[in-house]
Image: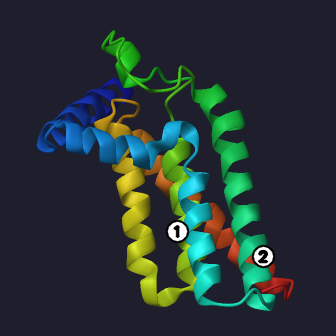
Amino acid sequence: MLESIISFDQYITSFISSLIPHTSLFDAVFSFLSLQGLTVIVWFVLFCIYLLREHFDRTSKQFLIAFLISFLSTSFLVNIVLKNIVMRERPWVAQQLSEVTCPEDFSFPSGHASGAFAGAIIFAHFDSKRKWFYYGIATLISLSRVYLICHYVLDITFGALIGLLIGWATLRLLASRKII
């Protein structure tokens, strides 16, 4: 059963990767979105834009607290705990490619996808008018990982679900404690 799931995942990953043309423009866009593991920079830039529109007040502090708890919890769970338990080989390693800009650690679940969706849910909560923009950015960050041959589709799917779940739990916890 597990082998069937892995085979299906590899097939879907190949199919999605083939749908997106591999051009220098897409290479640049998806490389930027991946930022060599530093997708927090994308969210930091968006936070600065958010602050430019608003003044730094109680809501901004609540937003920053929620974002940091969600993003750091997700990063720890995915990158330190889960990747080292599952230990799934990355697609570029399995395909024996050498010209890639992917990390050499394990693949499952995707830290980029989990961080992106943890960030998106917090941004969407505090700026609901632009929620689809934030989820769109998170989706593009996640797809960039498949495009760059760093992750399989199930890596980003489970990463996204983990990020959403931790983001949601963070918001509920902070609301129950009347922090937000």
63 lies above or below 105 = below
Q: Which residue is mark 2?
A: 173
93 lies above or below 112 = above
Q: Which residue is mark 1?
A: 120
Residue at 38% from the left image edge and 77% from the top image edge: 132
Residue at 67% from the left image edge and 57% from the top image edge: 71
Residue at 76% from the left image edge and 63% from the top image edge: 69
The image shows residue 123 at horizontal and vertical percentages of 57, 75
As shown in the figure, which amino acid type bears the numbered disc 2? Answer: Leu
Quarter of image, res 21:
top left
Residue 54 relative to residue 106: left or right: right
* SS label for mark 1: helix
Judging depth in this view, the residue of 42 and 4 nearest the camera is 42
174 lies above or below 106 = below
The image shows residue 139 at horizontal and vertical percentages of 37, 59
Judging depth in this view, the residue of 96 and 13 nearest the camera is 96
Of all residues, the one furthest to the front in this rendering is 52
Residue 107 relative to residue 64: left or right: left
Q: CA distance from mark 1 to mark 2?
A: 17 Å
Quarter of image, res 84:
top right
**Quarter of the figure with the N terminus:** top left
Judging depth in this view, the residue of 69 and 7 nearest the camera is 69
- Tag shown at residue 157: none
* SS label for mark 2: helix
Residue at 40% from the left image edge and 15% from the top image edge: 93
Q: Is residue 153 visible?
A: no
Residue 157 relative to residue 79: left or right: left
74 lies above or below 104 = below
